[in-house]
Amino acid sequence: MKIEFKLEKNCSEPKAIIIADKMTKEISSLMQLLSNENPQGFVGYSGNDVLLLETMEIVRIYTAVGKVFAVTDENEYVLHLRLYEVEEKLSEKGFVRISNSEIINIKKTKKFDLSISGTICVHLSNGNICFVSRRYVTKIKNTLGLR
């Protein structure tokens, strides 16, 4: 896909024009992303590929080596956002922070193992296992309705 940017001093509102020989799913997704004031997904980077990630396909988001990663059932993508920015976008969408470096999608969990004293082990739909840090145990228990 070719992308052009033209700077015009008289322009009062940004305008995007997509020129293609047919409508595709990618073009439709791009149009939806551009038309929404507050898009429902994220732009993920994997090598030379740039993908639009739907919020509900994300299993977990975590930080490592100074980057933020979004994990789906199929792949892992780099997000060019800070974790707190991601958390703000995901508030009220079924995501919960489980540590200073990780957010999970509650709808993509298989089970919560409470057998480990003082912490919670979370089994996710893609086979990943993560742990709720002690600082967030009360928050996750409240989210799940456990007392």
Image (spheres, rainbow, N blue to C red):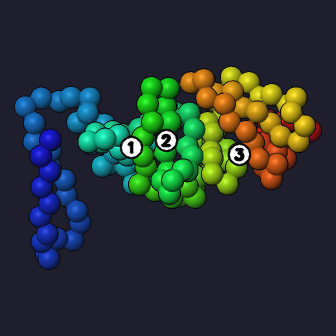
Where does the image place residue 145, in percent across and percent down from the top left? Answer: 84, 36
Helix, strand or loop status at disc 3: strand
From the viewer's side, name the closer residue of 73 and 37: 73
Mark 3–mark 2 CB contact (< 8 Å) = no
Which residue is depicted at the point 60% across and 23% down? 127
Query: Residue 70 shows which numbered tag?
Result: 2
- Which of the two discs, 2 and 1, labels the residue nearer the N terminus? 1
3D distance between C-alphas at marks 3 and 2: 15 Å
Helix, strand or loop status at disc 2: strand
Q: Which residue is mark 1?
A: 44
From the viewer's side, name the closer residue of 51 and 49: 49
Where does the image place residue 73, in percent across and percent down from the top left? Answer: 50, 26
Where does the image place residue 69, in percent across and percent down from the top left? Answer: 49, 45
Helix, strand or loop status at disc 1: strand
Where does the image place residue 137, in percent across and percent down from the top left? Answer: 82, 45
- Which of the two discs, 1 and 3, labels the residue nearer the N terminus? 1
Q: Would residue 97 appear left or right of 83 to someone viewing this image?
A: right
Which residue is depicted at the point 58% across and 58% down? 84
Q: Would residue 20 appear left or right of 114 to someone viewing this image?
A: left
Q: Which residue is mark 3?
A: 98
Mark 2–mark 1 CB contact (< 8 Å) = yes
